[in-house]
Image (cartoon, rainbow, N blue to C red):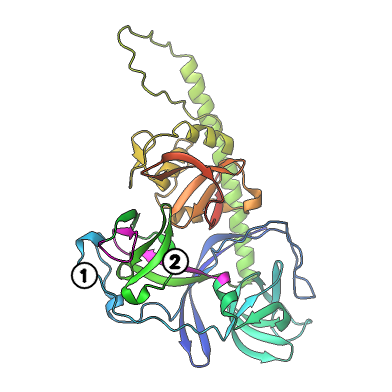
Amino acid sequence: MNRNRKVRLAATILTAGLTITSTGLTAFANPIAGATAMLSTDVSITQTANSYTTLSGINLAMANMLSSANAAANAPTETEEKETDVVATSSRPVNDYSNIAIAKVNDFVNVRAHASEDSEVVGKLYSNGAGTVLKKKGSWVKIESGSVVGYVKSKYVVIGDEKAVKKASRRVAKVKADTLYVREKATKKADIIGMVPRDEDLTVTSEKKFDDGWVKVSVEEGDGYVSTKYVDLSTEYTYAESKAEEQARLAAEAAARAEAERAAAAAAAAQAQRAAATSSTPQAAPSGGANTQQPSYTAPSGGSGSSVVNYASQFVGNPYVYGGSSLTNGTDCSGFVMSVYSAFGVSLPHSSSGDRSVGYAVSTSDMQPGDIVCYSGHVAIYAGNGTIVHASNPRTGITYGNVNYRQILAVRRVL
């Protein structure tokens, strides 16, 4: 079963703990394998082997975001290179994990209205989901997680475990400059290893240089440093899902699947019409003279994921161009995915972060050719047999790679 939810939250760490305030709900996929029911034992033990849960979850803008007024200044409108003397003025944030509970179950644990197994189930807290501990009552813990407030059995959660919290979360740097340079070292004099456009979000891998105004992030070219002046830092968690939210998610997933089937059928029909028109058109005889040996590309055919891969694969070897979307003259990673799918009548954003919300989610164990695979600051098309085809970087251009070469954040299916 795939589970969709992405909630942006703001949080303030108080003396008593962490208070969470919900600010919105957007359909976003969180694939967790296994069709399960709400069990009277309060914990689901059904799970498909090797299932994968994306960290789509819920963004919690915790108090360890940049705290000074300078860090909250207006977002830059120019690239980082046009700024001078980037120095972060905020101090390293203090993290408090003492009141954060993390679910340690195979699939989910029921959240109940009262501290009793006979009490109404008000929601589900999924594996590695997070909640704020409000109080303890015997063998029960009252938590607040997203829009859900209720009780879970204490044996199904760990509380105040910093290692568990960090493992269940994703530290995020969202770009707020038009173009952000990712540098080899934590200095503006260091070589640029990559560029990232506005509104993309990157996984933070280290904050050891935070006091110097830098954090290390993961990008296609490898780990590099970005200035904290040009990113907003937050922490992303998976939170509980209420019964109403679950029903809305299931309906949205059903609609997305139906749309994917419609898009596949429409693409196949369009390609069939194109093939028929081409076969009925007389072909011009080749002219004499020098053989220029120009590359020849086959028009897309069919409407399946395999058709997408076949079409995309013929552009392997063509160049990578930051911001580009030309399959022949140069494209970046999201431009490549966008342009390939455009040939099949599917509109996608020119954004690797945006691609994490298209179509519907599938687990990594259920990936099929044509699925969109999303990473930190990067996106690719699954080609089958553990490989991807993608516009990798300026050095390699459009190429093949191993699907598990980096941490997968989401897998989406649109056909």
Q: Amino acid at mark 1?
A: Asp
- At horizontal 76% and vertical 85% (from top left) the residue drawn is 116
Label 1: which secondary element: loop
What range of the chain is rendered magenta?
Answer: 167-189
Q: Position of residue 392 (x, y in %)?
A: 43, 45
Above or below for 260 versus 7: above
Would residue 232 be found to the left or right of residue 55 on screen?
left
Residue 204, labelled with which disc?
A: 2
What residue did someone put label 1 on?
85
Query: Can residue 147 be seen here?
Result: no
Residue 331 position by quadrant: top left
Q: Nearer the viewer, residue 169 or 244?
A: 169
Q: Nearer the viewer, residue 52 or 207?
A: 207
Above or below for 188 versus 289: below
Q: Mark 2–mark 1 contact, CB under 8 Å?
A: no
- At horizontal 55% and vertical 33% (from top left) the residue drawn is 307
Would residue 33 be found to the left or right of residue 375 on screen?
right
Q: Quadrant of the N terminus?
A: bottom right
Q: Amino acid at mark 2?
A: Val
